[in-house]
Amino acid sequence: MVFGAPWWDHYLPVILHMKGCKLRLLEPSVVHLVHGERWDWNIWTTLGQKFLEAISENATDADYKARLKIARKGERSQPWWRLGQRQLAMNDSGEGINDILHRVSSMNVLFLDERASIS
């Protein structure tokens, strides 16, 4: 993963959690300022696929692995499915990699939010 490029901000905290690090949200909250994109969607997709490969090989948390499997399959009953729906209008023509990546991204955010304590 490349620091500052898409997906590093998912990979780093997920892997740190799996290595036993405690995740903390700092107060005041750090915010992501709105700015022009410095990457394109092709990079997001390419690095997202690399994220899936790397996290699948290195995941040690059973709950995360189960959620990842569900997100990859697209079970609509999961809370991150609705988040992914807002990010990407799904079509009926079949699943593409971006459909999967949007669900995995939403799942990652919820997974990390559930595990982070507020400092």
Image (cartoon, rainbow, N blue to C red):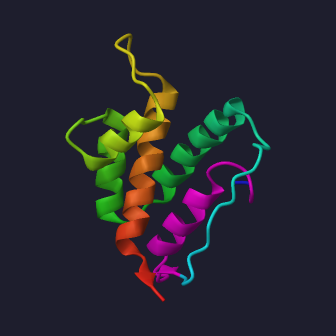
The one nearer the camera, 40 or 73, is 40
Say which residue appears at 45% left-offset and 81% top-offset. Answer: 20
* Residue 47 drawn above or below residue 8: above
Q: Is residue 60 visible to us here?
A: no
The one nearer the camera, 76 or 56, is 76
Q: On the picture, is 48 further left or further right than 20?
A: right
**Residue 13 in magenta stretch:** yes
Badge count: 0
For the N terminus, the image quarter is bottom right
The image shows residue 8 at horizontal and vertical percentages of 64, 57
For the record, the magenta segment spans 3-25
Q: Is residue 99 visible to us here?
A: yes
The image shows residue 32 at horizontal and vertical percentages of 65, 61
* Residue 63 drawn above or below residue 87: below
Q: On the picture, is 66 further left or further right than 58?
A: left
* Residue found at the very far bottom of the displayed protein: 119
Say which residue appears at 30% left-offset and 62% top-offset. Answer: 62
* Residue 95 drawn above or below residue 57: above
**Residue 68 in magenta stretch:** no
Q: On the picture, is 60 further left or further right than 74?
A: right
Dividing the picture into quadrants, the one containing residue 60 is bottom left
Say which residue appears at 75% left-offset and 50% top-offset. Answer: 35
Dividing the picture into quadrants, the one containing residue 13 is bottom right
